[in-house]
């Protein structure tokens, strides 16, 4: 049994308290209509914040008063297709692989960069469309690079400015050894020529989603790093996503406080045989920035979840990694009784991952009468199914589906057996209204051909991984859902993520899902053009988000 920050606490106690405190549910108001809240009445809180335009923190972190370096914008030319990049393991090829500045720039640009800039037709405000979607288009995630000397870029610690596609120089010198020590000398980090670090300026998301935002840190990181992993695969750069690290030590390196800006995860980029030189001293740093941290409201529930799922030192990270890697993984959930339906992943696409990311949009409009072929359906799920390259072995989330319109499948609810790449029918029938309900009453969940839900028994995960396992569970589920969406786009389909009322989801798929917790949901299907009325509603939606 393990814990993270408190050796006397029950494994997963902090994560379980946060997860239960922020479950979405429908409640009936006095007038008979329903509202969405988080938590359990009478201690529930609104699902959405006031979203006052006067204190909207915006979409970018802009570091001021430091040297900035413009980045090249050279596409990665690769013979590897988008579908192939999604199934890459991340640890190939063998041997030395040192990405240059052009490759690192492209990874940043296609992970959190701006694809294009438009203008809101009603307000005239600028809309920046990012490479990877984030919940509610709040774009709270930030990227940092820690490098040794790589071709085109000196050793240093850098912040990626998505607003102007530059690197801001935070520290000069090679700090990779410091990062490696903070991870307890994770082998991939210890041999990486470059290290990507992900943080969240949590108020930028909590402005809309309040305490629920800590879940979205890992949903959105999973979505973003799915792009990064696929782009790195196209450039043949080996990768590993690392969760075992001392949060406070990385906070020190980046000059963030762990309250207004949280460290979420990191990724080793490339491989070298040269040992990291000793790092310079990590002295305190701080910079003027927009939005100013002092202007951010505080969120004690999120702070408790972050600290409760943190690791205090590099030694603790090393211990956590050993314990998390010891013994066999929990057995995959057996499918329900009944005949299985093997998938036939035979669809192909010559689209590159560059092209797919460029064309990707969050699609909320589907033609419910047009079926998805069984082969395309099979290909999308199969492409999503690979395990992301992690620093510890981790069990795959369980996948449940509501199938509304797929050739060769009767409509109904299914369990996707990831080990056998096969389906088992749980309940047959038209479940479009159920899909709508479990998609937070969003019409696109009823119209889309497929709605996918990932779930897991978090208590089993906590027993092996402690509170830290909460971050991993949300991330792994989000990677599956994000790969599914990119694969759908590669085949010319539409896709988008959503939300779900936690306990209603478990109840619907029980008894098979009894004891499991909701992790992630997304849909895909045959997209259609929005009607004039729907476009008008979308404009109001953008107004609400002050895009």
Image: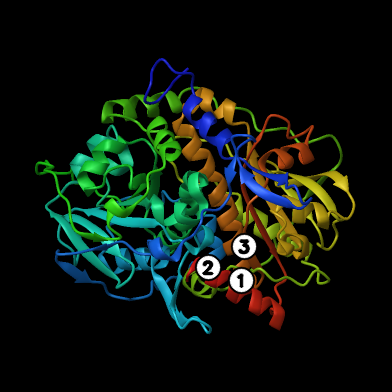
Identify which residue is drawn at 27% across, 34% down. Answer: 185
> In terms of depth relative to the viewer, which is nearer, 425 or 274?
425
Question: What whole-number distance in Å separates the C-alpha atoms at marks 1 and 2?
Answer: 7 Å
Query: Callout 2: 10 Å neighbours few (<14), some, many (20+)?
Result: many
Looking at the image, residue 386 sits to the left or right of residue 29; the answer is left
> In terms of depth relative to the viewer, which is nearer, 106 or 524?
524
Q: Which residue is mark 3?
A: 496
State which mark lies toward you, 2 or 3.
3
Whichever of labels 2 and 3 marks the residue nearer the N terminus, that label is: 2
The answer to whether 433 is drawn above or below residue 472 in the figure is: below
Q: Quadrant of residue 111?
A: bottom left
Q: Can residue 332 be seen at all in this image of the molecule?
A: yes
Q: Which mark is residue 240?
A: none
Q: Which residue is mark 2?
A: 81
The reply to whether dot 1 and dot 2 touch (C-beta < 8 Å) is: yes
Where is residue 238? Give x, y as percent.
Answer: 37, 52
Q: Of helix, strand and loop, which one carries label 2?
A: loop
Q: Of helix, strand and loop, which one carries label 1?
A: loop
> In terms of depth relative to the viewer, which is nearer, 455 or 235?
455
The reply to whether dot 2 and dot 3 touch (C-beta < 8 Å) is: no
Identify which residue is drawn at 26% across, 72% down. Answer: 71
Q: Quadrant of residue 65?
A: bottom left
Looking at the image, residue 201 sits to the left or right of residue 157; the answer is right
> Which residue is situated farthest in the top direction here?
8
Query: Callout 1: 10 Å neighbours few (<14), some, many (20+)?
Result: few
Q: Which residue is mark 1?
A: 349
């Amino acid at each position: 049994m393990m814990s993270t920050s408190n050796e006397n606490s029950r494994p997963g106690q902090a994560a379980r308290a946060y997860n239960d405190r922020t479950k979405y549910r429908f409640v009936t108001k006095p007038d008979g209509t329903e509202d969405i809240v988080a938590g359990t009445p009478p201690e529930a809180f609104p699902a959405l914040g006031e979203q006052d335009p006067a204190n909207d923190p915006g979409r970018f972190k802009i570091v001021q008063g430091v040297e900035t370096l413009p980045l090249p914008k050279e596409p990665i030319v690769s013979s590897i297709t988008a579908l192939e990049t999604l199934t890459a393991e991340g640890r190939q090829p063998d041997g030395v692989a040192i990405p240059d500045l052009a490759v690192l720039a492209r990874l940043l640009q296609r992970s959190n960069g701006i694809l294009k800039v438009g203008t809101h037709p009603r307000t005239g405000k600028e809309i920046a469309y990012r490479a990877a979607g984030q919940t509610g288009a709040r774009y709270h995630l930030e990227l940092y690079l820690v490098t040794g000397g790589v071709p085109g870029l000196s050793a240093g610690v850098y912040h990626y400015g998505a607003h102007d596609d530059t690197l801001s120089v935070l520290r000069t010198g090679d700090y990779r050894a410091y990062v490696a020590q903070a991870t307890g000398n994770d082998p991939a980090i210890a041999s990486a020529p470059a290290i990507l670090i992900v943080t969240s300026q949590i108020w930028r998301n909590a402005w809309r989603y309040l305490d629920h935002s800590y879940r979205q840190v890992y949903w959105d990181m999973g979505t973003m790093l799915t792009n990064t992993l696929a782009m790195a695969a196209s450039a043949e750069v080996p990768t590993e996503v690392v969760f075992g690290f001392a949060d406070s030590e990385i906070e020190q390196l980046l000059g963030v406080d762990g309250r207004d800006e949280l460290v979420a995860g990191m990724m080793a980029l490339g491989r070298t045989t040269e040992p990291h030189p000793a790092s310079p001293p990590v002295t305190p740093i701080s910079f003027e920035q927009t939005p100013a941290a002092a202007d951010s409201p505080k969120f004690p529930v999120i702070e408790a979840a972050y600290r409760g799922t943190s690791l205090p030192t590099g030694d603790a990270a090393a211990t956590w990694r050993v314990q998390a890697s010891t013994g066999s993984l929990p057995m995959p959930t057996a499918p329900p009784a009944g005949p299985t339906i093997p998938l036939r992943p035979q669809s192909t696409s010559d689209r590159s991952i560059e092209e797919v990311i460029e064309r990707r949009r969050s699609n909320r409009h589907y033609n419910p009468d047009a079926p998805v072929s069984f082969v395309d359906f099979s290909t999308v799920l199969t492409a999503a199914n690979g395990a992301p390259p992690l620093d510890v072995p981790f069990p795959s989330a369980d996948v449940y589906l509501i199938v509304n319109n797929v050739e060769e499948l009767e409509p109904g609810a299914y369990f996707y057996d990831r080990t056998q790449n096969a389906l088992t029918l749980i309940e047959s029938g038209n479940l479009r209204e159920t899909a709508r309900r479990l998609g937070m009453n969003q019409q696109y969940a009823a119209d889309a051909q497929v709605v996918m839900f990932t779930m897991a028994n978090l208590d089993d995960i906590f027993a092996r991984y402690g509170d830290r396992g909460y971050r991993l569970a949300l991330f792994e589920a989000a990677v599956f859902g994000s790969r599914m969406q990119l694969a759908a786009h590669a085949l010319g389909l539409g896709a988008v993520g959503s939300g779900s009322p936690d306990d209603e989801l478990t109840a619907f798929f029980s008894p098979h899902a009894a004891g499991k917790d909701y992790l992630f949901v997304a849909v895909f299907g045959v997209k259609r053009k929005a009607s004039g009325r729907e476009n008008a509603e979308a404009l109001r939606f953008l107004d609400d988000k002050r895009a």
